[in-house]
Image (spheres, rainbow, N blue to C red):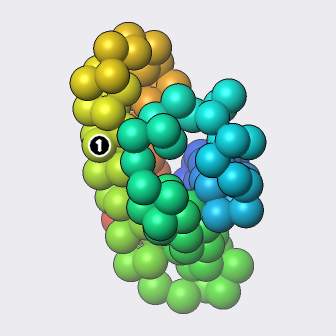
Amino acid sequence: MSAVYGILAGPLALFYLYGGGVKIARSRERLRPMMAWVDSTPMPAVRAIGVIEVLGAFGLVLPLVTGSAPWPALAAAIGFVALQIGATGVHLRMGDRRIALNLTLMLVAAVTAWLATTGP
């Protein structure tokens, strides 16, 4: 995998590792200031999203660390694109037009997915 992949995948993985960990560990009350959408989402779903984000973060870096096949990275990056498509829809449905972070994460995940398929 290329150095550019590592430059993009590393921070993306850290972002999702933190965000997922927060969703897993914090109560609805502690999540609410950061994520208004948690009020309209059952907590088991919020926790599941957190688990998916943490697993995806590991999937992004697993091939870099182990030298294994790139398919976990590709699957994780595509999953993050899908996650951000859904997140953008939730924000827009709630009337929140601040979606720049979602679009940026979607773009970085899409480029990361492409880089995961290009090899060294």
Write the residue at 69% across / 41% down. Answer: 29
Q: Is residue 54 above or below residue 27?
A: below
Residue 24, x across and y down, in percent = 65, 64
Residue 15 appears left or right of 36: right
Tally of numbered tags: 1
Residue 13, x across and y down, in percent = 63, 56
Of the pair 91 and 58, the residue shown nearer to us = 91
Residue 56, x across and y down, in percent = 51, 67
- Could you tell me if residue 53 is visible in this image? no
Residue type, numbered disc 1: Gly
Q: In this view, does 18 lie above or below 54?
A: above
Residue 91, x across and y down, in percent = 36, 26
Residue 77 lies in quadrant:
bottom left
Locate the N terminus by quadrant. Answer: bottom right
Write the residue at 39% across / 15% down. Answer: 96
Residue 49 appears left or right of 31: left
Write the residue at 35% across / 60% down. Answer: 79
Q: Is residue 68 above or below residue 74?
A: below
Q: For mark 1, does the 10 Å Cα neighbourhood hold few (<14), some (14 to 19), or many (20 or more) residues?
A: few
Of the pair 84 and 120, the residue shown nearer to us = 84
- Could you tell me if residue 64 is visible in this image? yes
The residue labelled by disc 1 is 86
Write the residue at 33% across / 14% down. Answer: 95
Label 1, secondary structure: give it.
Answer: helix
Q: In this view, does 58 lie above or below 108?
A: below
Of the pair 102 and 12, the residue shown nearer to us = 102
